[in-house]
């Protein structure tokens, strides 16, 4: 089932998510729905808070948005970052029609469990590492626009405000 994706400034995007305690049928269904939603919206990652669930659950597939060959479901992911800083364009399904350069780290050692409750640890680099850092930020209630310079952020907020006023008319 395709789920509605919350959009900034929805306050639910700013909540800190809690760990998944048990991989219940509901969690499996949520993960499947999140993957379906991510693909339907041409995304490469989606975190549970974006669909209104304050849980530490992330789906990603960086082979997308045109291909669907590398679906990963991360439950309770913990990241250890290393390497150089790298700056790349990011967007987010919760911040439509906007992208901006964000600085991240080059490598992420990921500790997580999969939908069978088994360890699913791996080392990510490059685009995958960036995507994982973006999605794990969502679990802390942080959006990529929270990492922009103050000037850029103010410009974005003004633009969104203007758009909202135009909609209201
Ligand atoms: Ni996002």
Image (cartoon, grey):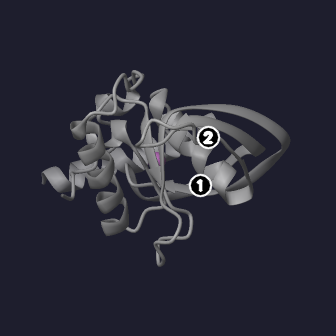
Number of callouts in the render? Answer: 2
Query: Gap in Å between the C-alphas at discs 1 and 2?
Result: 8 Å
Q: Is mark 1 within 8 Å of ligand 1?
A: no
At a point 27% along the width and 33% down the height, the residue shown is 24
SS at circle 1? strand
List x then y, in percent, for residue 28: 29, 44
User: Which residue is disc 2 drawn over?
Assistant: 148
Q: Residue at x 75, y 35 (%)?
A: 81
Foreground pick, 146 / 19: 19
Residue 30 screen position, x and y as percent: 27, 44
Secondary structure of the residue carrying numbered label 2: loop
Q: Residue furthest bottom?
A: 66
Quarter of the image for the C terminus: give it: bottom left
Asked if 143 appears above or below 31 in the picture, the reply is: above
Query: Residue at label 1?
Result: 100
Q: Earlier in the sequence, mark 1 or mark 2?
A: 1
| 134 relative position to 98: left or right | right
Query: Quadrant where the N terminus lies?
Result: bottom left
């Amino acid at each position: 089932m395709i789920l509605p994706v919350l959009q900034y400034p929805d306050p639910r995007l700013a909540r800190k998510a809690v760990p998944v305690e048990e991989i219940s049928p509901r969690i499996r269904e949520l993960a499947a729905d999140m993957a379906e939603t991510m693909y339907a919206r041409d995304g490469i990652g989606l975190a549970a808070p974006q669909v209104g669930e304050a849980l530490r659950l992330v789906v990603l597939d960086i082979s997308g948005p045109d291909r669907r060959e590398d679906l990963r479901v991360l439950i309770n992911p913990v990241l250890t970052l290393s390497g150089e800083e790298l700056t790349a364009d990011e967007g987010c399904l919760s911040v439509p029609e906007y992208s901006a350069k964000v600085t991240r780290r080059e490598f992420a050692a990921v500790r997580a469990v999969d939908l069978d409750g088994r360890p699913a640890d791996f080392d990510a680099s490059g685009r995958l590492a960036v995507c994982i850092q973006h999605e794990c930020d969502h679990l802390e209630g942080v959006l990529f626009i929270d990492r922009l310079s103050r000037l850029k952020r103010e410009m974005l907020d003004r633009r969104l405000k203007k758009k909202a006023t135009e909609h209201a008319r």
